[in-house]
Image (tube, coloured by chain):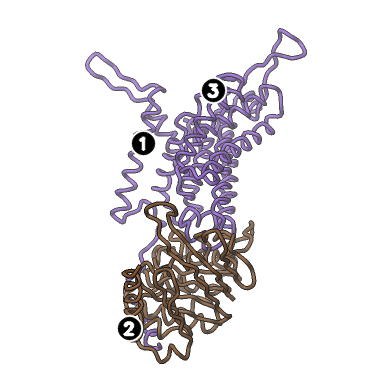
Chain colours: A brown, B purple
Amino acid sequence: MLELKGISKTFFPNTVNERRALKDVSLSLPEGDFVTVIGSNGAGKSTLLNIIAGSLPIDSGGGSVVIAGKDVTKLPDYRRASLISRVFQDPQAGTSPHLTIEQNMSLALTRGQHRGLGPGIGKARRDYFRKELTVLGLGLEDRLRTRVGMLSGGQRQALSLLMAAFTHPKILLLDEHTAALDPQRAELVTTLTEKVVGEQGLTALMVTHNMSQALRVGNRLVMMHEGQIILDLDEEQKRYTSVADLMDQFAQVKGQLSDRTLLT
Amino acid sequence: MISAVEQGLIFALLALGVFLTYRILNVPDLTVDGSFTTGGGTAAIMIFNGLDPYLATVCGFVAGCLAGAVTGLLHTKLKIDALLASILTMIGLYSINLRIMWGPNISLNLRPDPDNPGTSLKITHVFTGLQDAGLLYSWQMVGILSVVVAVAVAALVWFLSTNFGLAIQATGDNPGMALANGVSTDWTKMVTLMLSNGLVGLAGALYVQFNGAADIQMGIGMILVGLASVIVGNAILGTRFMVLATLGTVVGSLLYRLIIFWALTWEFQFGDFTFTTSPGDMKLISAVLVVLALVISHVVSKRGLSLSPWRDRKPPEPDSAPEGVAQEVANA
């Protein structure tokens, strides 16, 4: 479903601040894969997501992003939106605060389609939104005309998740989408994530800083370090891995790299 | 007094244009100062040369759209900051407007008769009929202008409720979200800037015919007129519903004209010296009005108050966990 080949990304090329965020990364996700991505700050997790979404262009010279058989390497983010949906870390980022819940959902429903002069909200759409919102169990189905800015962070993030998933995107990108929430809300949003991804069999990529969450959720785990994928665990391996194992692995890689740095 | 109401209605079209950029797109678009004259000048020169006044009025709208398109292209394609792009267009338009008008002013009263040199023809424009009947300053005229403004409000409210209109609203409200949902924000900004300046151009076209003359200076300060109307109007009726926000803009425009009308009657006595306000003081009064409107609406919203009876009501306890959350977590 998602094919990344030889992706490199350099920020501020040819300056003293040059930073190689991704070094020749390749990753392949078959349909229905739910991959969690972990790694320290600056490992390139968010850059990877931004490149898949099209918010950042990749370095020239090879490398391709193929989604559902379609080469989207050169398409800007808004033209990839029919294939990809995204939930951001910041609950404010995924919704439009001055628009109502139903207006936000209408925008999500028409994601990646031509938007003409048809009515944004009709009875059929409203009924559909209400039905979808009951899944969240937050009572939002009775508040369709409330402005999203009036909702709490947890409610907004749950709504963002629903908006991202209910259009059956080819790829769902989750960028630390529970990090800004209190533990209770984070738990709710994680549960909802597993529910919507599982029910719809979505192909998803979830960045997280929470290692136990990364092990518990999804069927595959990828660890990144300094712009490279250094560990790729399948469902079976993941089951027998603990947070301590991951920490060990992490320390080991770090050690190796610093040794190598010393030798060069 | 009636004249003030009529002007308020004509400038309501301009205010609706400013509403589109300032409120919906979240960009103060100074193109307005130029595009008002562009629209007015285009209509005036066409009417002066004997073309159909209705066609000329439509061309005033189109000319405004083109002015907006220039700002849009500078901003979206050349990545110039929106405010700066609009200033650049506004300055450039001054020269363009002089070219369009073939001079600094046009009087829409008489024109030389091309067939009989030495004689003049009376110019007909859209308000000529009413003017000849002595109804230029009458409630009939107010009625006609009200219909025009009502149509513009209805069209705007409908437009903003369509799929494309929602995309425009999201562009101004949260551009990142709009992009992530497949909105080409460059395109929505372009269309909004064009439509906005089209309305401003239309206001200019109607104003020159109402006024009987076009002048190269007439656009100066128009952005303030628009902003004052939007800010005052939105402070009164609120922005909870699009109908109220747009109607508020019209109300703001009417109030603005009435305040100016009233301010121009002021007279102060300092001993032997009498100070009276003159039309030249209008710009200062406008600026002070905008400052007052901004300060008042800021204070009002900071206190969680609203002058509008229709407003967002805070849900009882937005941050307390609703039952659903507890249940979901328990189920997990």
Pointer 3 residue: B215
- Residue B169 image offset from top left, x and y in percent: 51, 55
Q: Kindly identify the residue that appears in the image at 46 percent across and 45 percent down.
A: B27
Mark closest to the chain's N terminus, 3 or 1: 3
Q: The residue tagged with tag 3: helix, strand or loop?
A: strand
Name the chain under label 3.
B
- Residue B228 image offset from top left, x and y in percent: 41, 39
Q: Amino acid at mark 2?
A: Asp
Q: The residue tagged with tag 2: helix, strand or loop?
A: helix
- Residue A159 image offset from top left, x and y in percent: 46, 71
Labels 2 and 1 in the same subunit: no
Name the quarter where the C terminus of chain B is drawn.
bottom left
Pointer 2 residue: A248
Pointer 1 residue: B289
Judged left or right of residue B115, residue A221 is: left
Labels 2 and 3 in the same subunit: no
For the residues marked 2 and 3, what is the alpha-carbon distance in whole angstroms? 78 Å
- Residue A156 image offset from top left, x and y in percent: 42, 69
User: Can you tell which mark lies on residue B273?
Assistant: none
From the viewer's side, name the closer residue of B144 and A122.
Answer: A122
Q: Kindly identify the residue that appears in the image at 58 percent across and 19 percent down.
A: B103
Name the chain under label 1.
B
